[in-house]
Image (cartoon, grey):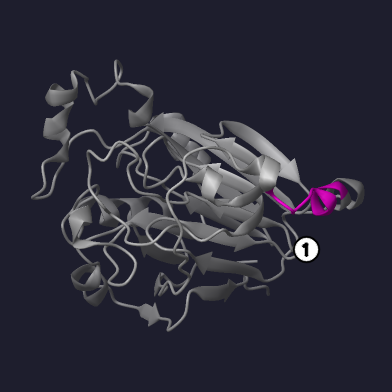
């Protein structure tokens, strides 16, 4: 089994939008969905290493829906606007009420933590350690958020205004990041979140044999610059790289201060552009 001869950069166009007010509180008590599928997954079990197609759906910004071969649905990093109002209107519309068996959030920033907007059956904010259900294995790797801006927008300068140290080891919780590793269908999918470019050594070791790497990429270098991205690709040697966390007209506002990822994508040697938000991925077998 090998999926590694080719680095392919995949850009997914998000077309899933819903217009409702921003809500910060849990809505679990209102949901009509139930845990029947999770009960069945527990009863039947599953093998996350068994090779089969996996569907990856882009929900905009850095939000993804991963559907396992047996139909379990995992949402990572749903977004919302900042409830404090301090950071402006990043998203003209609200995150869609996607139904998911598992909802994950990599860190406590508003553009990654709208877990209440999903119709999530089981919710894990900042998961650390392992969760295995059916044919899905999820590993949360505790590390740190990028703490110093590299691009033109010096967001890290706000640390002094907030009376905080954004950088470890004395950072507040919102500057911690938890990389999420989803293993299903024989694939190892890594969702980077807003992690620093050089994680702790034990985290780097846990990221060996990555098949699909989801990275924050935008031409303003809001989080990672081109050198950081190239280094991560060289280090982990994924078969597929999916850029995210960039400005997408129709979904994100210019007030995000982000740029598109067009220049970075144009500079890559092998790019597949999709018209829609979904892609089916499967490990090659020999």
Q: Residue at x 61, y 43 (%)?
A: 27
The furthest residue to the left: 152
Residue 261 vs residue 17: left or right?
left
Q: Residues within 10 Å of mark 1 (few under 14, many from 20)?
A: some
Q: Residue at x 30, y 68 (%)?
A: 248
The furthest residue to the bottom: 275
Regarding residue 171, the answer to whether it shows in the image is: yes
Q: Is residue 159 above or below residue 48?
A: above
Total numbered badges shown on the rendered structure: 1
Q: Is residue 11 above or below residue 85?
A: below
Q: Quadrant of residue 213?
A: bottom left
Q: Quadrant of the N terminus?
A: bottom right
Q: Quadrant of residue 220?
A: bottom left
Regarding residue 3, the answer to whether it shows in the image is: no
User: Is 67 covered by the magenta stretch?
Assistant: no
Between 167 and 99, the residue placed more toward the observer is: 99
Between 40 and 146, the residue placed more toward the observer is: 40
Q: Dot 1: what SS?
A: loop
Q: Is residue 81 above or below residue 198?
A: below
Q: Residue 166 in the image: x percent, y percent?
A: 24, 26
Q: Which residues are magenta?
A: 31-39
User: Is 36 covered by the magenta stretch?
Assistant: yes
Q: Residue at x 67, y 73 (%)?
A: 285
Q: Residue 150 in the image: x percent, y percent?
A: 14, 44
Residue 238 vs residue 122: left or right?
left
Q: Residue 133 in the image: x percent, y percent?
A: 76, 45
Q: Which residue is mark 1?
A: 70
The furthest residue to the top: 170
Residue 47 vs residue 248: left or right?
right
Q: Residue 16 in the image: x percent, y percent?
A: 48, 70
Q: Residue at x 42, y 52 (%)?
A: 236
Q: Is residue 83 above or below residue 81?
A: above
């Amino acid at each position: 089994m090998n999926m590694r001869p080719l680095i392919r950069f995949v850009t997914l166009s998000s077309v899933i939008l819903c217009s409702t007010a921003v809500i910060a509180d849990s809505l679990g008590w209102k949901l009509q969905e139930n845990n029947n599928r999770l009960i069945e997954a527990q009863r039947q079990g599953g093998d996350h290493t068994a090779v089969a197609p996996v569907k990856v759906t882009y929900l905009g910004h850095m939000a993804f829906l991963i559907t396992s071969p047996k139909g379990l649905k995992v949402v990572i990093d749903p977004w919302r606007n900042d409830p404090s109002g301090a950071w402006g209107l990043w998203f003209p519309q609200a995150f869609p009420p996607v139904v998911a068996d598992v909802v994950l959030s990599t860190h406590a920033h508003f553009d990654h933590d709208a877990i209440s907007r999903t119709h999530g059956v089981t919710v894990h904010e900042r998961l650390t350690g392992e969760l295995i259900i059916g044919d899905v294995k999820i590993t949360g790797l505790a590390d740190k958020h990028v703490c110093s801006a590299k691009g033109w927008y010096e967001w890290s300068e706000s640390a002094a205004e907030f009376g905080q140290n954004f950088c470890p080891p004395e950072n507040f919780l919102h500057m911690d990041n938890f990389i999420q590793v989803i293993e299903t269908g024989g694939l190892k999918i890594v969702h980077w979140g807003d992690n620093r470019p050089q994680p702790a050594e034990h985290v780097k070791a846990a990221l060996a044999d990555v098949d699909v790497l989801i990275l924050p990429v935008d031409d303003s270098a809001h989080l990672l610059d081109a050198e950081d991205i190239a280094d991560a690709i060289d280090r982990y040697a994924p078969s597929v790289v999916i850029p995210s966390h960039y400005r997408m007209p129709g979904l994100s506002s210019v007030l995000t201060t982000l740029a598109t990822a067009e220049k970075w994508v144009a500079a890559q040697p092998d790019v597949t552009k999709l018209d829609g938000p979904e892609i089916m991925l499967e490990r090659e077998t020999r």
